[in-house]
Image: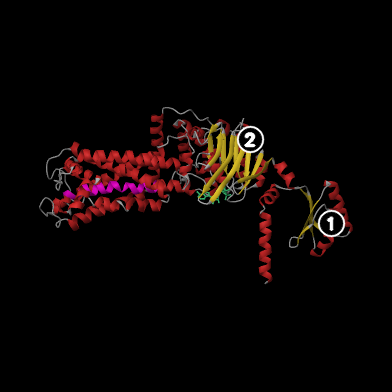
Amino acid sequence: MSAVSDAVRITAPGNPVSRSIRDSLIVAKRNLIRMSRIPEVVIFGLIQPIMFVVLFTYVFGGSMKIDGSTSAEGYKNFLMAGIFAQTVTFATASSGAGIADDMHKGLIDRFRSLPMARGAVLTGRTLADLVQTALTLLILAVVALLVGWRVGTFHDTNAGRVLAAFGLLLLLGYAFTWIGALIGLTVRTPEAATSGGLVWLFPVTFLSGAFVDTSNMTPWLRHIAEWNPFSATVQAARVLFGNPGQSHSTAWPMEHPVWASLIYSVLIVVVFRTLAVRKYRSATA
Amino acid sequence: MPGAIYAEGLVKTFGDVRALDGVDLDVPEGTVLGLLGPNGAGKTTTVRCLTTLLRPDRGKAVVAGVDVLKHPDTVRRSIGLSGQFAAVDEYLTGRENLQMVGQLYQMKAKAAKQRAADLLEQFNLADAADRPAKTYSGGMRRRLDLAAALVVSPPVMFMDEPTTGLDPRNRQQLWEVIKQLVSGGTTLLLTTQYLEEADHLAHDIAVVDHGRVIAKGTSDQLKARTGGERVEVVVHERAHIADAAEVLRGFGKGETTVEEHTRKLTVPVTGGAKLLAEVIRELDTRGIEMDDIGLRRPTLDDVFLSLTGHMAEAADQDEANGKEAVK
Ligand SMILES: Nc1ncnc2c1ncn2[C@@H]1O[C@H](COP(=O)(O)OP(=O)(O)OP(=O)(O)O)[C@@H](O)[C@H]1O
Ligand SMILES: [Mg+2]
């Protein structure tokens, strides 16, 4: 029983920034270990987007008009940017459910009684979700290539631009996990966080240029779709991939999709991180 | 100067439930306070307010010399907490759980690893150390949670029902750990449903009910308040109950209570062992055979029941049930 007396005293806090990074990484590692022990979650997370790739390609392909033609080939190459973008936003549900689960199981109480950096529990979770999203996206890209998706089919592109597209997609996914974090802290049960994280994603992702050409929408819907932050990333990815069906709208986010995507995502992170961290500090399980 | 844990007039309401209704506490440095009280009395809420997890609506709290409401971040550097429900990550192994907590206490990875190994050994979890906590039994989880609270030795510890669900051996061992901690200068606030535990570990006891501290003092002081000693007899045959009751009335300083089904009679007395001997002699003379006889001092259970009045409630309940049966 000598271990008690061997116990170390708590050290004084160091540099807040490096401490915040360190604490976040410790929590991220914990969440990644968890995810690796429940691979079902990652696998089921893959099924839906893969189904979308296959269904949209074979069912809708051939009847959708992209750049004035209804070739199945054209729709396939148009579609992938949209599916990729939709897939990264599903991380919202995962991060929300994870945080709600931690609240539910009392782990948040444990963390909140420790002398950790204040945003670290949430940042750690969102970082782990980012890793998971990257993995999902990688597998999805392989599936997309298998069904015949190619970059540079509409105009030239290069490896750097393709990587930049994936970067913007991941940033969008990361931004949405902060929305998920806030939802998870608010609803408190993992089930509610999952459905609460998903329901509003459908209108957001469908009211966009992800799956259809926005120019065929009624004007008011078209305006919403063109200013939808989600559409900006879809358009940016399409442009960077050199895929067809890019919007010719004169709406600012459609003309400057890369900037729009960056600005929107960073803005979402800033706003929702602030709200979530505040909520975390006052959260009671 | 206030003690290591100090609370004054803590009030916390949840909707229309007044969980805390003015809790006052003062725990001197290096001592153990046992917080007793019936379910829903406000013990956990008190602990949560003092450990920065919950913001009281009103009142003042100072832990390790720091105002809890004004500087919660500073307080967190001086406290350890084991909550009422084990807070461990089910998918992490016991070792990973402890290492993570150590690192979040700003320990270096290597030190955290060593510390985790020591604690797993100490809490009899070495064999299960590398299994996910999901596979642990209830008592094992509880121990892991306690180990997590002890990763560093903070000057002030809070343990909410630490031994609930532990088997007798592990409970004894935890008691040893606690005693060692306290002898090293740690101040501890402990809630418990095991009054024996409070008797054993706590320097002072506070009884809470309906969100208020209704009594405090040492275990002896509280017992003295509840009343003096009693003689308790269990007669061998039911037929002898009336006879025995008559004898006890002769020696007693109050009403004799009789439990028919256990053949147990109890009477308050003064006079200690000498009187007990006389009672035995008299019962013997009358040929009343006894299964058991003894001098009983009030236990903390008696204190608890008399203070929180649940004995009375239980009696009312029995009476009501009895009437039902008669109908
Ligand atoms: N988050 C909450 N929301 C609503 N009511 C709550 C909440 N937490 C506690 N309460 C209420 O506050 C009162 C005190 O609860 P508390 O958990 O402090 O009791 P306790 O003394 O720890 O009981 P036990 O011995 O059962 O653990 C109870 O009536 C409980 O229902
Ligand atoms: Mg409790």
Q: Which residue is drawn at 20% across and 49% down?
A: A223
Q: Quadrant of the C terminus of chain B?
A: bottom right
Q: Residue B95, position in %: x, y?
A: 48, 40
Q: Mark 2 points at which residue?
A: B31
Residue A172 appears in the picture as rendered: yes
Q: Assess whether residue B8 is covered by the magenta stretch.
A: no
Residue reaching furthest to the right: B285
Q: What residue type is labelled 1?
A: Arg
Q: Mark 1 lies on which chain?
A: B
Mark 1 neighbour class, 10 Å CA radius: few under 14, some 14 to 19, many 20 or more: some
Q: Which residue is drawn at 19% across and 44% down?
A: A235
Question: B113 left or right of B287?
Answer: left
Q: Residue at x 44, y 32 (%)?
A: B109
Please report the bounds of the magenta region as a residue range: A77-98
Quick one: SS at disc 2?
loop
Which numbered dot is residue B249?
1
Q: Are both tags, 2 and 1, on one chain?
A: yes
Disc tally is 2
Q: Which of B221 and B135 is in front in this view?
A: B221
**Predominant SS along the magenta part:** helix
Q: Which amino acid does label 2 sit on?
A: Thr
Q: Residue B326, position in %: x, y?
A: 69, 70
Q: Distance between the residues labelled 2 and 1?
A: 43 Å
Q: Nearer the viewer, residue A80 or A96?
A: A96
Q: Which chain carries label 2?
A: B
Which numbered dot is residue A157?
none
